[in-house]
């Protein structure tokens, strides 16, 4: 039990450090120093450039071994499994077609892999954790631009998947650029590696500051009054990671850094793009924003516990 609480404190300390950065973004928006509107303009820089740099750096600085290649494949399968668990849990729960059901369902399935899990893995586990989480980001992007769009499209029309959007996302771009260095052992020259590493170092603070501005713009009024948000919180923040933890611990097939990085992703709060997709497909963006914000606030308590259990 003493070891568990020690692990909780280690994980909680890292989560709290991230939330201090979130608070900076919150204050910046409230004081109009750096507003949510400006943050959204910065989002593409973070999404396409900085996240890609993080993934490229992790591949380019990791020596290739058959064991590492095997672990990357397992990391991908674990990420798929995390989403499958979310999909299966929501199947019997949102059949009545009540208002906002698709928002809640999407928020239960898709977690904040890029802006919450990746920075936390970087802080707790270093490049190895980022390497495994980058495979999760790749899986997330492919699924959210296929299954996610199909889920959010309420028009009844046949969903048109954009191959361009599936391929041109930081998960796939980063892996495509970084994987050759990992496989061949070729070292990036310093005049390229140092800029890539410098850009990658912006990921955690910028992602958290942007998240803080989004929370501020959402407003805290009414944040805790929607009872259905608590159910999303239970599914996304508690049920999904605990099921993944039980399966992975029970089988013993996944251990160490790979296990912890998988659980970091599984316990991540609802994805920010819940709001983006709600806007794209004519759903209530206010409900989506409050749901994501509530899940994110609550994750400061749940993520350390899940991570600590993974470390036992």
Image (spheres, rainbow, N blue to C red):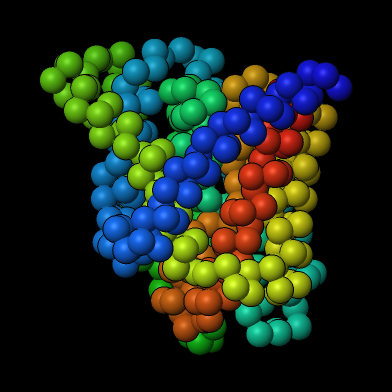
**Residue 35 at x, y = what percent?**
33, 63
In the figure, residue 54 lies in which quadrant? top left
Q: Nearer the viewer, residue 43 or 62?
A: 43
The quadrant in which the C terminus is found is top right
**Residue 41 at x, y = what percent?**
26, 61
Left or right relative to 169: residue 118: right
**Residue 141 at x, y = what percent?**
45, 52
**At x 69% / y 68%, what residue is drawn?**
224
**At x 52% / y 31%, what residue is drawn?**
121
Q: Taking the image as drawn, is residue 150 in sight?
A: no
Q: Nearer the viewer, residue 25 or 146?
A: 25
The quadrant in which the N terminus is found is top right
**At x 46% / y 37%, what residue is drawn?**
119
**Residue 181 at x, y = what percent?**
29, 22
Is residue 251 shown above or below 219?
A: above
Q: Taking the image as drawn, is residue 184 in sight?
A: yes
Q: Residue furthest right?
A: 1
Is residue 144 shown above or below 287?
A: above
The mark tally for this picture is 0
Q: Residue furthest front?
A: 31
Is residue 84 shown above or below 36?
A: above
Left or right relative to 179: residue 265: right
Left or right relative to 33: residue 98: right
Left or right relative to 311: residue 57: left
In the figure, residue 50 lies in which quadrant? top left
**At x 60% / y 30%, what residue is drawn?**
13
In the figure, residue 186 lies in which quadrant? top left
């Amino acid at each position: 039990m003493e070891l568990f609480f020690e692990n909780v404190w280690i994980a909680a300390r890292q989560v709290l450090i991230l939330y201090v950065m979130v608070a900076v973004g919150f204050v910046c928006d409230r004081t109009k120093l750096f507003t949510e509107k400006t943050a959204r303009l910065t989002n593409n820089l973070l999404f396409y450039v900085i996240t890609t740099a993080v993934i490229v750096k992790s591949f380019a600085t990791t020596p290739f071994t058959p064991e590492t290649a095997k672990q990357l494949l397992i990391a991908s399968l674990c990420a798929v499994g995390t989403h499958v668990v979310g999909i299966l849990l929501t199947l019997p729960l949102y059949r009545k077609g009540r208002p906002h059901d698709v928002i809640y369902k999407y928020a239960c399935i898709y977690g904040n892999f890029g802006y919450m899990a990746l920075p936390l893995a970087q802080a707790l586990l270093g490049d190895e954790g980022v390497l495994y989480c980058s495979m999760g980001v790749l899986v997330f992007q492919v699924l959210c631009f296929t299954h996610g769009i199909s889920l959010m499209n309420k028009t009844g029309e046949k969903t048109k998947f954009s191959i361009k959007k599936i391929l041109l996302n930081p998960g796939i771009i980063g892996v495509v650029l970084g994987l050759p260095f990992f496989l061949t052992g070729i070292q990036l020259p310093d005049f390229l590696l140092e800029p890539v590493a410098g850009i990658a170092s912006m990921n955690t603070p910028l992602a958290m500051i942007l998240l803080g501005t989004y929370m501020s713009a959402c407003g805290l009024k009414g944040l805790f009054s929607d009872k259905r948000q608590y159910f999303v919180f239970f599914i996304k923040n508690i049920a999904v990671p605990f099921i993944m933890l039980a399966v992975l611990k029970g089988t013993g097939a996944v251990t160490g850094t790979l296990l912890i990085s998988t659980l970091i992703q599984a316990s991540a709060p609802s994805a920010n793009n819940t709001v983006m997709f709600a806007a794209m497909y004519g759903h209530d963006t206010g409900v989506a924003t409050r749901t994501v914000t509530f899940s994110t606030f609550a994750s400061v308590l749940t993520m350390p516990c899940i991570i600590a259990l993974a470390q036992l």
